[in-house]
């Protein structure tokens, strides 16, 4: 910070200027100077220390102004400020150290001091303690001793400060072994709060795994145990290599730069890298959008790669510290495992440091040994370092070596430890070295709310999900997946497909097609038979097919199932595709996996399996399917005391689509409700839990009237229920039968005890008539950064004389209700709605006819509909 600011401050104070305004002006000017220097490209390290230096000068002058020299008190910088590191909006943490608890005049001076600091624009975190209170508080709280370790004298009685440093030294309290253990537990708890992943969509750059706290953690241990003030001193003690030291410093500088920009952007102490800030900082740092990679995605990939490396270094160094601090007097219990590897106190290590240089294939062998010896707790830090140092040996020649290829396939064929092995390979950099295309997706984020992990993390999560299907103790989690998995002859083909399914993201073009080419090349390189290579390539190329079919098409329609079955071709492909699809959706966003999606996929799996067993040349006809459903439903209704005549009279009023859309149990339930009532001038509301569909059904029966469906959706939205699918049927006598398949907003079934509330609100709401189209509600904060124009597509189902309306629009509360009102205003008849939400985007498909039950074919009417929808959705 320019000395001219302090010189101006001293000059104005000497001229008897009003202190409050003078200090406030200097601080305001310093913020502008900091911002200008940062934008000019000055080193962020210099700026962070410069702000700390300026605050030092200000605090010393304020202290002299308020605290008489004869008072036995000391002003101490603690925490990050104690380290001499202050970002633009960082708190200024200070300790006011006193001989005795302040009273009278001294207490008044301290109160005036703190108030003045806040008034001039410093956000001060302060504590007032005696020496004894400092020691007592530090003994009981590892966070306090950590702050005191980093304390720095500012003003006042320096002797008192030195006494505090001596009284809180590691020879008095918190010896280094206990301190290390406590800080490790603290870090473990902090990582758990952030899901134990460095790849959060809106990360906290200070506290996330791999964040600044992880670097500080290393510094704290170094200071407490080694009495070293700088990380560079670890170089001389052999704990850090030169490359690792520079990686730590570069990582810290990168995160500091982001944090500095974030504070300037927000004007407050907030370390969350929110979506709206990611775009702004990416532009500020000079990133530009590319065809297949947004500027913000490039910026965040750099961030994620940085924190991944810092997380790895943190883990490795803490393991080295553990050996030096906790096990320093414990001899290494060596157990020989093979010629090249041994166990030392439960951790795998090479038998000598030259193994990888002499025999690079041992790098892959290490992971196989870990799988074969589950009793091992991990890999020794010294061996991890050797792996990293020899990654350059994994070149094209290495990848073509039959020993390497055999080892990699053997890892995938092991009965245990596959996902752990692959995750460890990724952490050490081996996976990207062995499969170079994997390096492209490391740290690659997709700027949306659908994908909550980076592509590499998502891939590893998918592989973990696949492995769970094979573990007996998780059989109750997904019984069908476990049963299908147990029938696979070659599970390794599924793992290879999982590794490659998203490997081409960010390259441009169709990632499924490009990934299939990579997967086929990998299979051929590893000498897999042509049939296996074709299978893996097909799975990768088709990995989105089942999800799209289940969520966007009517899987009750035998034609849809027949077409899907023809694309799949055989039952073996169906098994592989089903398992990959379930694992993929769950690994994309676990919070959005619901029993409804599980039901969609399992029903499509079973119906496709039956179609393939029956034979593609002998498709199930609609009439045959309807007759089968009616026979089963009639049997149920007869058992409930209803006659064939009454049931058939009701069914004659329904369309064929009704019987195609509903299963026998639903048909029977609807029929029983309908036939139990004679007058439908008032609404009948019924609810039930649908086990087969993995959701709850709200069934509404009422005389058809204008905007009935739209009003239903508005009321259900008010009830905070998520509509997954809706079906609309009107009998020939004008009675509307509306089914809404719903879940709570958290993806669970309707909470116990809510049925009466739902029935009451729907009955009351439907009694009232309203023709007012609801206004579009503002987008929630997280969705605003993804705002885009709606995309409307209209196609024709010529065979059934229906129109399909597909709307992709920003998801928001009340969206379905808004669309329904527009359709009603256009005089259109809505038959069904399939609701799919992909992150911030709703992708909904509606089946329509005009008021005469015909497809929409008039171009003018179609253009009018599209314009009306866009007007409501995008304004």
Image (cartoon, rainbow, N blue to C red):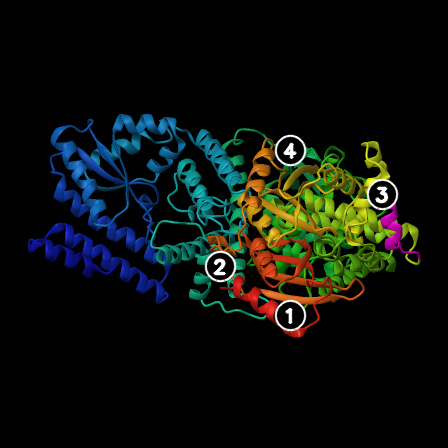
Residue that appears at 47% across and 58% down: 278
Per the model, the C-alpha gap separating discs 3 and 2 is 45 Å
CB contact under 8 Å: marks 3 and 1: no
Q: x%, y% of residue 234?
A: 45, 45
Tag 2's secondary structure? loop
- In reply to whether residue 155 is colored magenta, the answer given is no
Front residue of 39 and 558: 558
Sequence-wise, which precedes: disc 1 or disc 4?
Answer: 4
Residue that appears at 27% across and 61% down: 32
Q: How many marks?
A: 4
Label 1 environment density (alpha carbons within 10 Å; few <14, some 14–19, many ≥20): few
Q: Which residue is mark 1?
A: 862
Q: Which mark is residue 346?
A: 4
Sequence-wise, which precedes: disc 1 or disc 2?
Answer: 2
Sequence-wise, which precedes: disc 4 or disc 2?
Answer: 4
Sequence-wise, which precedes: disc 3 or disc 2?
Answer: 3
Q: x%, y% of residue 466?
A: 73, 45
Q: Which mark is residue 785?
A: 2
- Please give left or right for residue 318 compared with residue 631 in the image: left
- Name the main secondary structure of what is drawn in magenta: helix
């Amino acid at each position: 910070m320019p000395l001219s600011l302090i010189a101006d401050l001293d000059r104005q104070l000497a001229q008897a200027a009003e202190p409050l305004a003078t200090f406030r002006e200097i601080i305001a000017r310093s913020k502008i100077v900091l911002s200008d220097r940062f934008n000019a490209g000055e080193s962020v390290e210099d700026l962070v220390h410069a702000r700390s230096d300026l605050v030092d000068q200000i605090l010393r002058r304020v202290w002299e102004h308020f605290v008489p020299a004869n008072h036995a008190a000391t002003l101490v910088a603690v925490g990050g400020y104690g380290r001499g590191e202050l970002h633009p909006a960082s708190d200024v943490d200070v300790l006011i150290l006193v001989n005795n608890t302040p009273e009278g005049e001294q207490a008044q001076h301290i109160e005036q001091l703190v108030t003045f600091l806040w008034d001039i624009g410093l956000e001060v975190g302060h504590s007032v303690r005696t020496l004894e209170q400092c020691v007592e508080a530090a003994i009981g709280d590892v966070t306090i001793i950590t702050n005191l370790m980093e304390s720095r004298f500012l003003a006042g009685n320096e002797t008192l400060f030195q006494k505090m440093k001596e009284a809180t030294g590691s020879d008095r309290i918190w010896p280094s072994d206990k301190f290390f253990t406590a800080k490790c537990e603290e870090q473990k708890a902090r990582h758990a709060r952030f899901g134990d992943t460095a790849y959060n969509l809106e990360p906290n750059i200070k506290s996330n795994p791999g964040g600044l706290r992880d670097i500080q953690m290393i510094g704290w241990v170094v200071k407490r145990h080694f009495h070293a003030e700088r990380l560079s001193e670890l170089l001389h003690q052999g704990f850090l290599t030169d490359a690792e030291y520079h990686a730590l410093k570069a990582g810290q500088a990168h995160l500091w730069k982001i944090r500095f920009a974030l504070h300037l952007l927000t004007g407050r102490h907030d370390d969350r890298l929110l979506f709206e800030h990611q775009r702004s900082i990416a532009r500020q740092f000079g990133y530009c959008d590319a065809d297949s990679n947004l500027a913000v995605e490039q910026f965040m990939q750099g961030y994620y790669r940085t924190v991944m490396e810092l997380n790895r270094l943190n883990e490795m160094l803490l393991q080295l510290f553990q050996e030096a601090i906790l096990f320093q007097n414990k001899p290494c219990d060596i157990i020989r495992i093979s010629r090249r590897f041994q166990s030392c106190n439960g951790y795998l290590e090479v038998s000598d440091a030259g193994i990888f240089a002499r025999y690079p294939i041992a790098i892959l062998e290490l992971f196989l040994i870990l799988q074969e010896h589950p009793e091992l707790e991990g890999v020794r830090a010294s061996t991890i370092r050797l792996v990293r140092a020899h990654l350059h040996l994994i070149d094209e020649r290495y990848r073509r070596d039959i020993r390497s290829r055999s080892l990699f396939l053997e890892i995938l064929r092991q009965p245990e430890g596959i996902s752990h092995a692959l995750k460890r390979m990724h952490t050490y950099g081996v996976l990207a070295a062995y499969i170079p295309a994997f390096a492209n997706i490391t740290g690659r984020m997709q700027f949306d709310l659908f994908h909550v992990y980076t592509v590499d993390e998502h891939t590893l999560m998918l592989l973990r999900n696949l492995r769970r299907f094979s573990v007996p103790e998780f059989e109750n989690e997904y019984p069908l997946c476990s049963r299908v998995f147990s029938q696979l002859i070659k599970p390794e083909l599924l793992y290879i497909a999982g590794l490659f399914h998203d490997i081409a993201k960010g390259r441009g073009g169709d990632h499924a097609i490009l990934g299939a080419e990579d997967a086929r090349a990998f299979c051929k390189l590893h000498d897999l038979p042509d049939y296996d290579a074709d299978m893996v390539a097909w799975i990768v190329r088709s990995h989105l097919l089942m999800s799209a079919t289940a969520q966007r098409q009517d899987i009750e329609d035998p034609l849809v199932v027949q077409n899907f079955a023809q694309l799949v071709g055989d039952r073996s492909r169906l098994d592989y595709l089903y398992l990959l699809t379930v694992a993929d959706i769950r690994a994309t966003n676990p919070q959005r996996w619901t029993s409804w999606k599980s039901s969609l996929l399992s029903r499509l799996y079973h119906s496709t399996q039956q179609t393939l067993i029956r034979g593609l040349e002998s498709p199930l006809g609609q009439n045959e399917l309807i007759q089968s459903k009616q026979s089963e439903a009639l049997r149920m209704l007869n058992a409930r005391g209803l006659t064939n005549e009454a049931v058939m009279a009701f069914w004659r009023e329904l369309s064929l689509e009704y019987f195609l859309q509903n299963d026998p149990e639903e048909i029977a339930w609807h029929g029983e409700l309908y036939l139990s009532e004679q007058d439908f001038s008032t609404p009948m509301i019924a609810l039930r839990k649908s086990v087969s569909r993995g959701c709850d059904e709200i069934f509404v029966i009422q005389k058809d009237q204008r905007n009935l469906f739209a009003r239903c959706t508005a009321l259900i939205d008010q009830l905070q229920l998520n509509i997954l699918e809706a079906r609309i049927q009107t009998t020939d006598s004008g009675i509307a039968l509306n089914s809404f398949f719903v879940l709570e907003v958290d993806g669970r079934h309707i909470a116990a005890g809510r049925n009466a509330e739902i029935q009451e609100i729907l009955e009351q709401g439907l009694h009232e008539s309203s023709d007012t189209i609801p206004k579009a509600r503002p987008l929630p904060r997280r969705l605003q950064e993804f705002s885009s124009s709606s995309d409307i597509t209209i196609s024709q189902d010529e065979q059934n004389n229906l129109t399909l309306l597909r709307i992709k629009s920003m998801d928001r509360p009340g969206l379905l209700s808004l669309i329904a009102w527009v359709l009603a205003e256009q005089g259109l008849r809505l038959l069904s709605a399939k609701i799919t939400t992909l992150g911030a985007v709703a992708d909904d498909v509606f089946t329509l006819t005009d008021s005469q039950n015909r497809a929409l074919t008039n171009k003018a009417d179609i253009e009018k509909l599209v314009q009306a929808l866009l007007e409501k959705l995008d304004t």
